[in-house]
Image (cartoon, helix red, strand yellow):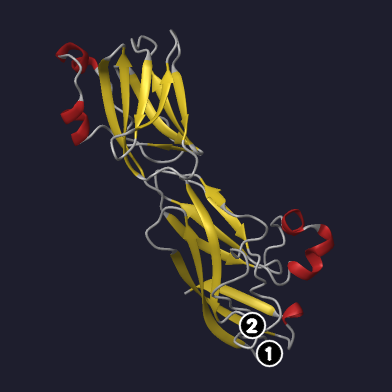
Amino acid sequence: MTRHLQDLDRRTALRTVASAALAGIAGCLSQDSSPGNGSSAVDGPLQQVTVDGTAVVVGLASEADVDRINLIQPNGELFAQQAVAAGVQQVSFEIGATYPPGEYDIVALQGEETVTEHSFQLQPEIHIRAVGLFRNHPEKPWDEVYGESETDRLKNGEAFVTVENTGTGPEAVVELIFLGDVPNPLENPRGNGMYETERVVVPPGETVDLFSGSFPFGSESESGMGCSPSGNSGQFTVTVKTQHSDGPASNTFDVQYSGSNDMVDCEVSITEA
């Protein structure tokens, strides 16, 4: 999904060194930041800046007289550079998920002269939207994730966590933790708590399912909450740690275990607290 970025701001006005004539025809970036929406056509060499997956994509006017586009990172240093051949109307910068978040500049040049410049934010923001189990969500790709030979054992004890990136830059989730009233709470799970992956990249404007690797709803541990025929109720917290955020994202859920003495055939109801 493509995320449109904001218009030029204070640094554009302060740092553009193009001539007055060029500045007069300089285009502005789309102000529509909602995913999937297009932007109206504008005059000037820079038509649009978007984030598509893990790449910054710069759209150029057909008449743009530029031969180079620079991507400047928040500390003012060059992040990447792309040559622009005659007639090219789009260039792309792969930023991955390890870029420094903050305010970036796109600088369009002809020779050594800056034609125009625009600033925008690359800032991810992860939110936890849902948690689910196989018994309630069999439509998820459990066999694909865990393998058919292991599914019967794992799918009843593992969980998926849906996260959404509402920011303007891609993010990488690097750890998944379940604490509180789950059968097997682990503050420090072996590995990172996700199943057989070091990180999961979440592009801006997208939702992704993370699959656990710590057996949070498996056999009841000494500190966990189990099932009972009459029902046990509690709360648990899901935490995801990410590449960029200052602190982890967390969300708390109400849970009820009922109908059995064994987690294998327990009825589990999970709702956001």
Location of residue 133 (image quadrant): bottom right
**254 relative to 22 in the view: left or right:** right
| Up/down of 239 relative to 47, above or below | below
Q: Position of residue 128 (x, y in %)?
A: 49, 61
Q: What's the residue at 49%, 67% (across, down)?
A: 239
Q: CA distance from mark 1 to mark 2?
A: 7 Å
Q: Is residue 257 above or below residue 18?
A: below
Q: Residue at x 37, y 12 (%)?
A: 67
254 relative position to 134: left or right: left
Q: Which residue is mark 1?
A: 228
Q: Is residue 40 visible?
A: no
**Residue type marked 2:** Tyr
Q: Amino acid at mark 1?
A: Ser
Whole-percent x, y for residue 59 in the image: 41, 22
Question: Toward the viewer: 181 or 192?
Answer: 192
Mark number, residue 257 = 2
What numbered label is drawn on residue 94?
A: none
Q: Secondary structure at mark 2?
A: strand
Query: Residue 20, relative to residue 250: is it above or below?
Result: above
Q: Is residue 194 shown left or right of residue 241?
A: right
Q: Residue at x 21, y 13 (%)?
A: 22
Q: Callout 2: 10 Å neighbours few (<14), some, many (20+)?
A: many
Give the residue at x 23% y 15%.
25
* Residue 117, picture quadrant: top left
Q: Which badge, 1 or 2, comes first in the chain's sequence?
A: 1
Q: Are marks 1 and 2 in contact (CB under 8 Å)?
A: yes
Which corner quadrant of the image does residue 116 belong to? Answer: top left
Q: Furthest residue to the bottom?
A: 230
Q: Residue furthest right?
A: 149
Q: Residues within 10 Å of mark 1 (few under 14, many from 20)?
A: some
- Please indicate, yes or no, whether residue 207 appears anywhere in the rendered image: yes
